[in-house]
Image (cartoon, coloured by chain):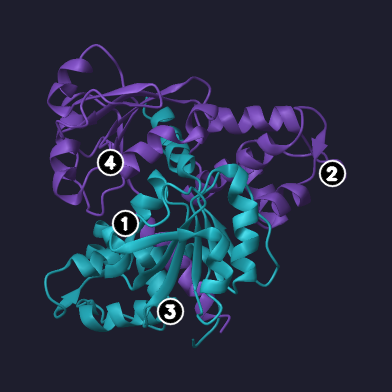
Chain colours: A purple, B cyan
Amino acid sequence: MSGGRLPPSTVARLPRYLRFLEGLPGNTGVVSSDEIAEGSGVTAVQVRKDLSFLGTIGTRGVGYEVGALRGVIIRALGLEGPLQVVIVGSGNLGSALANYRGFEARGFMVHGLYDADPERIGTEINGTVVRHVDGMVDDLAERTIDIGIVATPREAAQSVADLLVRAGVRSILNFAPVVISAPAEMTVRQVDLATELQILSYHLARTR
Amino acid sequence: MSGGRLPPSTVARLPRYLRFLEGLPGNTGVVSSDEIAEGSGVTAVQVRKDLSFLGTIGTRGVGYEVGALRGVIIRALGLEGPLQVVIVGSGNLGSALANYRGFEARGFMVHGLYDADPERIGTEINGTVVRHVDGMVDDLAERTIDIGIVATPREAAQSVADLLVRAGVRSILNFAPVVISAPAEMTVRQVDLATELQILSYHLARTR
């Protein structure tokens, strides 16, 4: 990856711009920062600033070339090649994630699905057979998995994270409502499904 | 709600601070901005800046009083009273959300659960019976629902959103991978489960 580090808030907005661009018909033509802003729920000033960090400056009065801009954002996010994902936990959330159509379309391949519940082992979700988590470290010995998703109950999350670390998985996305610890060199992101509700709550409180 | 509007990035970080504070044993004692920063994955400077927007300034060399700070954040986010939530879509994602333990603990009550699949109507998820979405507008005629969660397939999302608007629901959280439109005065947030993977991808690309 070239260039300096992007501000975290810019990184968080790039997927939105990409989603908007992907929703445009075809891969040609130009799009203005106003249009990107409108489609992404961001101000046009912010769009131009974010994109300038990528070294992409639209043509004044014309805009950005759609295909080129998509390519720039995809490269900036490191999404050129498919990223390999394993999901641990095949309950409702893990199943929802394994079935989520947006993943494959965006270059994330679900390589494996693990659980500890004997009743679930061997069942198939969206083409992937659920395997026992006890075999995960061995299963993944020969493979590089980019992202391990923890979709287990809170109680199991840390031990699953430890297994993902042992399996050499490069990063962890934790949906369990508990903070997990991992070696400092490992990127761990915590998703809390209540956060979005809390942000909505803020907006509701201001419109009453 | 008092005071001016908070920067959106501050609003987005407040739930993280709150989560950290809630994880502390007891509701007494003091906590430093360094500790909040460490526990929330944010810099201490950012923590102090965010909290200063709330009119809360810690005592230099001492920190913030835990119980008071929790209260200030809860008020800022409008989380004093329980917020009423309905979930439309009782598939894996809707079920995962209805079962999510973090909601009730944070003041969100799942008032109703709706689906269009006859096989799901009448089933019970986490104590809530799934009802037919065709009856939703009537069901909610006498109630104020704060947040309607769309957890349907992409194809159904807009028509469900239209029903939520007709039902007088105050805001929408959309998990379907499609942009939905709603009246301008309504707050709509779009959750894309792939976004977090894309942000992780950025970090992975920089550590290779």
Instruction: Report the chain holding disc 4.
Output: A
Looking at the image, do the residues carrying marks 2 and 1 touch, with CB atoms under 8 Å apart? no
Q: Is residue B28 left or right of residue B207?
A: left
Q: Residues within 10 Å of mark 1 (few under 14, many from 20)?
A: some
User: SS at mark 3?
Assistant: loop
Which quadrant of the view contains residue A120? top left
Pointer 4: what residue?
A91
Q: Are marks 1 and 4 on the same chain?
A: no
Residue B69 in the image: x percent, y percent?
29, 79
- Work out whether A197 lies above or below A127: below
Residue B78 image label: 3
Pointer 1: what residue?
B125
Task: Name the N-terminal-most of marks 3 and 1.
Answer: 3
Q: CA distance from mark 2 to mark 3?
A: 42 Å
Image quadrant in which the C terminus of chain B is located: top left
Q: Residue furthest top?
A: A142
- Work out whether B75 lies above or below A197: below
The amino acid type found where label 1 is placed reads: Ile
Is A184 or A19 nearer to us in this picture? A19
Q: Residues within 10 Å of mark 2 (few under 14, many from 20)?
A: few
